[in-house]
Image: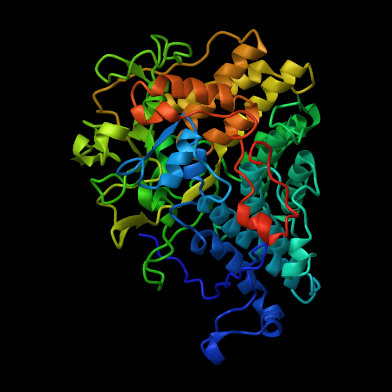
Amino acid sequence: MKTKNTILFLGVACLCGMLAACSDFLDASKPNGILSQDEVSTVDNIDNMVIAAYAYMVTGEEMNSSFQLWQLGNIRSDDAYKGGANTEDGSHMYYAEIANGLTTDLWMFDDIWYRLYCGVARANDALRILNKYTEEEFPQKTERTAEMKFIRAHFMFKLKELFKYIPVVDENVPDDADAYRQISNRAYSNDSLWQIIADDFQYAYDCLPETQTEKGRPTKAAAAAYLAKTYLFKAYRQDNVDTHEITSIDAADLQKVITYTDPAIYTSAGYGLEDDFAYNFLPGSYENGKESIWAVQYSQNDGTKYGNLDFAFELTAPQGIGCCDFNKPSQNLVDAFKTDSNGLPLFDTYDADTYNSASDNVDTRLFHTVAIPGFQYKYNPDVEYTQAWARAPSVYGYFASLKENVDKDCDCLVQNGVYFANSKNWIVLRYADVMLMRAEAEVELYALGQAGGNLEDARSIVNTIRQRAAESITFIFDYDAKFCIGTYDTAWTSADEARNAVRWERRLELAMECGRFFDLVRWGVAEETMNAYYGSEKNRRSYLNSAYFTKNKNEYCPIPYKQINYSNNVYIQNCGWE
């Protein structure tokens, strides 16, 4: 069981157009428990401001539109159904799932915008105070500045992949509502916005240490991984404001992905693949393992009512645990794990019929990702996941999501009203993701005929990940399933062949980790993938009959109507939502 230090100083959110976070802190000895701005802005309080920015990753969390973005990264993709009691249960997520019925004033869009910018504001508050002091006055200034720029860029990255065109507010902008209202979300191009985020991560990379005693603080490798991810998204240029189509793929950006995924950056600091895929998704001693480059740290028994638990996924526990069976793996995703007699993916025929554990070969990662009736739940030999655990099987089927959930007997599981949260960390960046980013960049550079393009290295990376998957049977060795996963033993002869394999591997390896939809948008294939998925899946799930993805609209969320109003119409709406 984890017990971590109680966070004593928590910032207070305020509503002011851009929706920044105030700098007031609680102090029981003060009238109303509030410290003044001058009292907060002392060298003794710098670390408290930094902690407040970290704390917001937990205290700012909300299960209906989580910072992990499962509602907007999983269920908008072909990986997951919304789940719950019916389509009306969490109707905002239902509209997102079918890409229809969405409006610019839907509360979910405004809520996630507001809370992510509160995270940005927390980091800015800390940076403003850091900027007041010299290195002599506060010896940790450079490192703490790097941490806060990393945290700010983390929140900005999420805003960027959700809304595309966003206002940029840094520590140099006066902490004033009128100042915020004058900042346009079109002050920078799509490409320039990615560069601004990359610049924060670059500062972090240049100034952070290789290791941290306190695991929640980012390291140089974490900054490198986020730099690589930022440049990978940036490489697929979408700078035509009237469309979301890929206009070009930039070789220089891809070269930076190669630079920041250099294995030496990670191995020198002790990072690498876990021996078993399952180790990434277990609590206790498995947390902060060698594959976890940066993770949000959750806790319990820390002096607060429930602890700083992972409330983001409270809704995703199946009914056998408590509530509420949302975020359910799709049949399409389950079928994608099927393999042929050589243990390779069934690229063209995988979804022709549904997975049958008695007859179909399957990738081992399926049983680490999806709870399937008749098998153990989260490796507990005394607990079988049954059809009775499904809340609405006639609507959403019987599968449940495993990675974010824990064994029902785990002492890390805490009841919160009718909901159940747990204290298992959430990995934001893991080494397998870094490896697959490198493979993707190598394939695209090869397609462009540029230096750094290397299909053989990309194939080697994918094979390494698949070999690890094949060996990931520590907890599932006695499952009654036909495990069969092989490697690509023949050289890839074209960029198309390599691209297909790398993208497929990314889906399987990172399934249900909330990034699938954003990958589809980055590649420029969201419309064709999602409409093909709707076309086949509606034969299984009738509620998808009205689902349809509109190109040059549904790739990004609309700029929230409330935010446009707060800005006095300075903000410009994304294309397709006018």
Q: Residue furthest front?
A: 578
Q: In the rendered view, tell whether residue 284 sits above or below residue 332.
A: below
Decide if residue 44 is on the left or right side of residue 428: right
Task: Tell me which residue sits at (47%, 71%) in the image.
Answer: 6
Decide if residue 230 is on the left or right side of residue 343: right
Q: What colour scheme does the image use? A: rainbow
Decide if residue 178 is on the left or right side of residue 423: right
Q: In the rendered view, tell whether residue 167 sits above or below residue 371.
A: below
- Residue 74 seen in the figure: no
Task: Tell me which residue sits at (54%, 65%) in the image.
Answer: 55
- Residue 286 seen in the figure: yes
Q: In the rendered view, tell whether residue 531 sits above or below residue 386.
A: above
Decide if residue 439 is on the left or right side of residue 469: right
Residue 120's image quarter? bottom right
Number of marks in picture: 0
Q: Looking at the image, which is closer to me, 270 or 43?
A: 43
| Residue 435 at x, y percent in the picture | 60, 31
| Residue 148 at x, y percent in the picture | 68, 60
| Residue 196 at x, y percent in the picture | 77, 48
| Residue 102 at x, y percent in the picture | 52, 42
Q: In the rendered view, tell whether residue 503 sits above or below residue 392.
A: above
Q: Looking at the image, which is closer to me, 87 or 254?
A: 87
Image quadrant containing the C terminus: top right
Residue 455's image quarter? top right
